[in-house]
Amino acid sequence: MGRFSYLSRAVWLLSLISLFTDLASEMLYPVMPLYLRSIGFSIFFIGLLEGVAEAVAGLSKGYFGQWSDRLGRRVPFVRWGYGLSALSKPLLAVLATPAWVLLARTLDRLGKGLRTGARDALLSDETTSANKGKVFGFHRSMDTLGAVFGPLAALGWLAARPGQFRPLFLLAFVPGVLAVAVSLALRERPAVPSTRPVRPFWASFGYWRVAPPAYRRVTGGLLVFALFNSSDAFLLLLARQRGVSETGVIGLYILYNAVYVLSAWPLGHLADGLGPRRLLVGGLLAFAAVYGGVALAHEHWTFAALFALYGLYAASTEGVAKAWVSNLCAKPDTGAALGTFSGLGSLAALVASLGAGALWQLAGPGWTFGVAAVAALGMAGYLAQIQLPQPLPDQPS
């Protein structure tokens, strides 16, 4: 293995599982807003749907992250979480009513909440602090590779059968089942269970109050930004509204994910060398440029350039943030720390998506994206100057 010895068997398996799951999800994600619009759903309802689904994921991430720590076990949460997400895909094809779509989408997000804290903790446990950026970056690259192949499959389908969205939901079940099959090969690592009590589902973010100050300062800033970071569905809807074809919209999403795939792992290496703070600040500046740019964009080539830059933003923030957060907590609390961070982020996405949908309806898309761009600039400034206390024993700064 040599240079890549940090890519353990478990890291590879978790990355393959994420690849297959994202392949299933991303066959549907870029066409979901188009599908919902085709059956009469409003922009506001699309924002409400995405927000409620993410809220369910948010609450469950913190709760099941706690349980994973308390039991000292990760693998069962991973298997069941991916299983629920796989099951949700064909359910979306059964009925096209708002209540049923909300139920199926919520089941998918519940699966995400069940697995996220345990999976990220397992990734963190598989490596050292010096290699966490690389490991999380590699996982994000593999995960997002599915987000390249998924939209390509959707693009091929719609090119041959324009407007026929519902069969895609049945096709997406196949890679979901493959993800569950690969998860059966995971083996549990010996772990020291946490002694912290598990709080009820509705109070599952209790870790925040006992977390180290550095954890609260970093995640607090990132969560404030998340309040303005709405669903990517709004970017896709704006491109469509500005004249990009349905297949062109999917092509933009493929471009975004392709840039993400190619850059997440190298940027993870860079984060280990330069520190995660610099990567996150750069990513937020890229986000501000993208959201400020799309508010003014009309030409197709402009959208292409901005979606490519958006891929660099995602690659320099998502895995890097998790790597940084996992270094700001005690090891037995990793599941709760990462689950709380991801969970509160999902709840913030509820506010962001509802706010973006309402602002779009009331004032137009320019305000939706302009406000988010300003928030990103503010948060980049905050992270650049934030003063952190001394790290925990045996924890890197």
Image: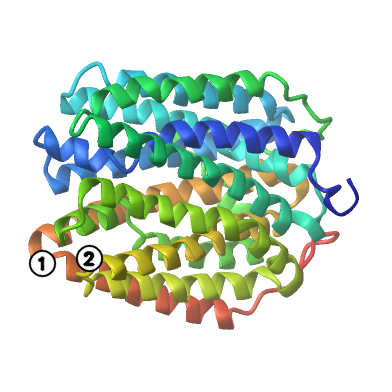
Residue 295 lies left or right of residue 389; in this view the side is left
Please tell me which residue lies in front, 260 or 248. Answer: 248
Residue 238 lies left or right of residue 123; in this view the side is left
Callout 2 crowding tier (Cα within 10 Å): few <14, some 14–19, many ≥20? many
Rendered residue at 32%/47% (across/down) = 250
Residue 342 lies left or right of residue 39; in this view the side is right
Type of amino acid under label 1: Ala
x then y, percent, for residue 338 = 60, 48
Proximity of marks 2 and 1: CB atoms separated by less than 8 Å = yes
Disc number placed over residue 240 in the picture, else none: none
x then y, percent, for residue 386 = 58, 79
- Colour treatment of the image: rainbow
Please tell me which residue lies in front, 313 or 51. Answer: 313
To which quarter of the image does residue 165 belong?
A: top left
Rendered residue at 44%/68% (across/down) = 309
Rendered residue at 48%/35% (across/down) = 23
Specify the quadrant that holds the N terminus. top right
Rendered residue at 78%/57% (across/down) = 131
Question: Residue at label 1?
Answer: 363
Question: Residue at label 2?
Answer: 368
